[in-house]
Amino acid sequence: MTARTCIPWPDKRLRSPAAPVEAITDEIRAIWDDMIDTMEAMPGVGLGAPQIGVMLRLAVVDASEERGQAVRMANPEILHASVKLRSHDEASPNLPGVWAKIERPRAVTVRFLNEAGEIEERDFVGLWATSVQHQIDHLNGKMYFDHLSKVKRDILLRRAKKAR
């Protein structure tokens, strides 16, 4: 298990959709382990595989207070999203030094392939839901700032450039 380096924005892999995972193998489990180590080292509450340059639909999320509750997901998809929204400051290790308040559904129901290779459906609420949606965006080649207006996005990217 190793913390991996997050690829820097504007690496084109961060704009590319990730490939579906065909089966849960020891290699996939090892990638998840590295992703959890990377997430803990940041520290963060989630990570999508493309953030470390692995172009597979893999994500990990751990928004627990005590940590050690990471949910490993392959091919996650949102089945249902609440109408009620929640605002939260979001950031990315791929673009350090900046963040933005993003509004997303407060709760989501997600279907994914779990560590045992079984299809699982799970409800996520609050920070868990925000993180799951943020990671699925990464798997689809989107960044959190894509949810901002063009003006706000341009300001954020200029600030990030100055921070580097």
Image: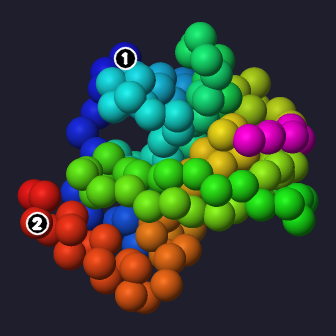
Residue sitting at 75 percent across and 24 percent down? Answer: 116
Q: Which residue is mark 1?
A: 1
Left or right of 146? Residue 99 is left
Element under disc 1 = loop
In the rendered image, residue 152, in percent from the top left (x then y), is placed at 40, 79
Q: Can the viewer see residue 36?
A: yes
Amino acid type of the residue that numbered disc 2 sits on in the rendered structure? Lys
**Dot 2, crowdedness within 10 Å: few (<14), some or many (≥20)?**
few
Left or right of 159? Residue 77 is right
Q: Can the viewer see residue 139?
A: no
Quarter the N terminus occupies:
top left
In the rendered image, residue 106, in percent from the top left (x then y), is placed at 78, 52
Left or right of 74? Residue 56 is left
Element under disc 2 = helix
Q: Which residue is mark 2?
A: 162
User: Which residue lies most toward the bottom here?
Assistant: 150
Amino acid type of the residue that numbered disc 1 sits on in the rendered structure? Met
**Which stretch appears magenta?**
121-126
